[in-house]
Amino acid sequence: MIPLLNIALRINSSILHTLDYILYHVQTLYLFTKADIKVIVLPVTCLAAASAPLTSLSCLPHIIFWIWIQTLQLGLSNQTLDPEEDKQNKPYRPLPSGRVSLRTAIILRWILPIVCCVWSASYSTLLLYLGIINCILIIIYDEMGYAAGHWFIRNVLNALGHASLESGACLLAGKDVNVLDPVSFRSVVCSAGIILCTIQAQDFKDAIGDAATCLAAASAPLASLSRLPHVIFWVWLQTLQLDFSNQTLDPEEDKQNKPYRPLPSGRISLRTALILRWILPFVCFAWSASYSMPLLYASIANCIIVVIYDEMGYAAGHWFIRNVLNAAGHASFEMGACFLAGGNVQALDPISYRAILCSAGIILCTIQAQDFKDTIGDAAVGRKTLPIVHPKVARPILLMLMVAWSIGLGIIWRLDLLTASAITMLGTYIGWAFVTERSPKEDKKNLFYYLVGNIFNVFLDS
């Protein structure tokens, strides 16, 4: 009996040792992608689930694993280039923490492209092509040094990389793994456009134009691609007016926080900026009137809201008034963009109206998400934001409203159960992140997720 017991104990110890060995290396692979799971894997999965839409829950593991293995390749490529940098900034990563040697990581880095291509080919030839494209983009971005190159080239590569991941995820989520349906294609194009235009953003509050353009393209719907430049330029012109108004009010504040802006950097004088600030409304009116009277009215409404918000001082007023003005401002942007995107610049169709109302409702209830990261600065200048007026309940309220709106959107757009569940999980995740992660750096990161979530919601009417 004793020899048999010893054999059993040895076998048990061997099994436990093997499991411990496997778990150790699985955790090592996870740590290579830890930072990208929130930024890439989850958002891309949700986009695919909503826009393909997800045909069955059984597709979900395939989508998540395919995105994750592509992201693992990206993580290994990035982290093997300059492991010394991570010793200071991200010591938990496998290389600086000593979990894996640089030689082993480099071997894995160049084995993974083959693994990714073989895994993709097991589904379809089109998915293989997307896997190859993603591998090539990573090499151009990291190994060829374009990550440190011109900002526009970096933006283009980021946009193409996201597009390849999202296209692959949509193929796996949809009914046919060999064909990307029109709705998924439009979602991927809009998402890539947003990444191209905003991936460099550090001040995440300036996402109005991207959300308005994306909403117009998805809900109007876009009559033709030739309409897109008209939409983008109109939204940008209105945003330019808003920025001039905001940045000429207190240029001294930007000297400390945003010295790259034109006024604190000395690229333009305050007098010239003020002249441009008050010329721009008339430029906006004239440009809008060249299309239609309804578009002119949307522009006038936007200009009035900007004056009330900035020059009349309501930006520093009661938090609810600020939310109302933000919601009304976004609605004016989105209404104008939908006019230009649709086939009739004189009238909006019912879907566009409903999309604008939903978007304005979400902004009205949740725009205070942008105030958490600026609580100290806002308190110093006397602003009465919700996080300052009601610090104990502001975050739980945001969570409840995010969940409520996520469920409400599923009902309003009559989504299928799987898509509605994906939207609700996304809203819950973002709201919970604000509750549990409270540092200014985390609030800034979570604000990015909030804005991406808002932009993602505009695809629901598709």
Image (cartoon, grey):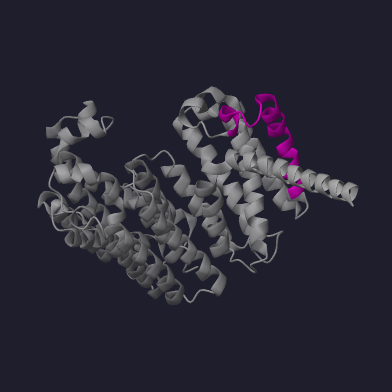
Q: Residue lying furthest front in this view? A: 2
Residue 60, image x, y percentages: 63, 61
Residue 289, image x, y percentages: 25, 58
The majority secondary structure of the magenta stretch comes to helix
Q: Tell whether position 107 is magenta.
A: yes
Q: Tell whether position 8 is magenta.
A: no
Q: Is residue 390 above or below residue 279?
A: below
Q: Residue at x 20, y 40 (%)?
A: 247
Residue 401, image x, y percentages: 34, 66
Q: Is 338 displayed left or right of 292 in the figure?
A: right
- Nearer the observer, 333 or 439: 439
Q: Residue at x 72, y 29 (%)?
A: 107
Q: How many marks on residues?
A: 0
Which region shows up in magenta? 94-119
- Nearer the observer, 153 or 123: 123
Q: Residue lying furthest top in this view? A: 84
Residue 158, image x, y percentages: 52, 40
- Asked if residue 160 shows in the view, the reply is no
Q: Is 175 displayed left or right of 40 in the figure?
A: right
Quarter of the rendering containing residue 290: bottom left
Quarter of the rendering containing residue 179: bottom right
- Nearer the observer, 365 or 26: 26
- Asked if residue 312 shows in the view, the reply is yes
Q: Is 68 displayed left or right of 353 in the figure?
A: right
Q: Residue at x 32, y 46 (%)?
A: 206
